[in-house]
Image (cartoon, rainbow, N blue to C red):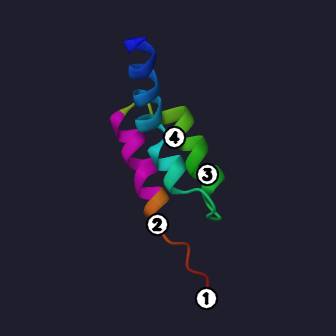
Amino acid sequence: MGIIILYLVIGFIYFVPSFNAYKRPEFWATFVVNLLFGWTVVGWIIALVMSWHKNEKK
């Protein structure tokens, strides 16, 4: 039972950038980067920064 909870917590942490980008125009781009490159620390940080970035159109 403990291992299942551990996997759920790790899965949640892994997808934090995608959860953060939800309901933003760049959600799918952030999700794809997070899914494909999130297993690397650099890819996860890039996805996190993408989720914080505000897409301002002029």
Residue identified by numbered label 1: 58
- Residue 41 on image: x %, y %: 34, 36
Q: Which of marks 4 and 1 is nearer the N terminus?
A: 4
Give the label on residue 42, or none. Answer: none
| 10 Å crowding of disc 1: few (<14), some (14-19), many (20+) | few
Q: Is residue 24 left or right of residue 17?
A: right
Residue 36 placement: quadrant: top right
Residue 5 placement: quadrant: top left
Q: Which of marks 2 and 1 is nearer the N terminus?
A: 2
Foreground mark, 2 or 1, reads 2
Q: In which quarter of the image is the N terminus?
A: top left
Q: Give the range drawn in magenta.
A: 41-50
Could you give the CA–CA distance between mark 3 and mark 4, rounded to whole angstroms? 8 Å
Residue identified by numbered label 2: 53
Give the label on residue 29, or none. Answer: 3
Could you give the CA–CA distance between mark 1 and mark 3, rounded to whole angstroms? 21 Å
Q: Which amino acid type is marked by label 3?
A: Ala
Residue identified by numbered label 4: 34
Q: Which residue is drawn at 51% across and 40% down?
A: 34
Q: Earlier in the sequence, mark 2 or mark 3?
A: 3
* Vertical arrangement, residue 4 with respect to residue 50, above or below: above
Q: Earlier in the sequence, mark 3 or mark 4?
A: 3
* Vertical arrangement, residue 28 with respect to residue 36, above or below: below
In contact (CB < 8 Å): disc 2 and disc 3: no
Q: Which amino acid type is marked by label 4?
A: Asn
- Give the prevailing secondary structure in the magenta stretch: helix
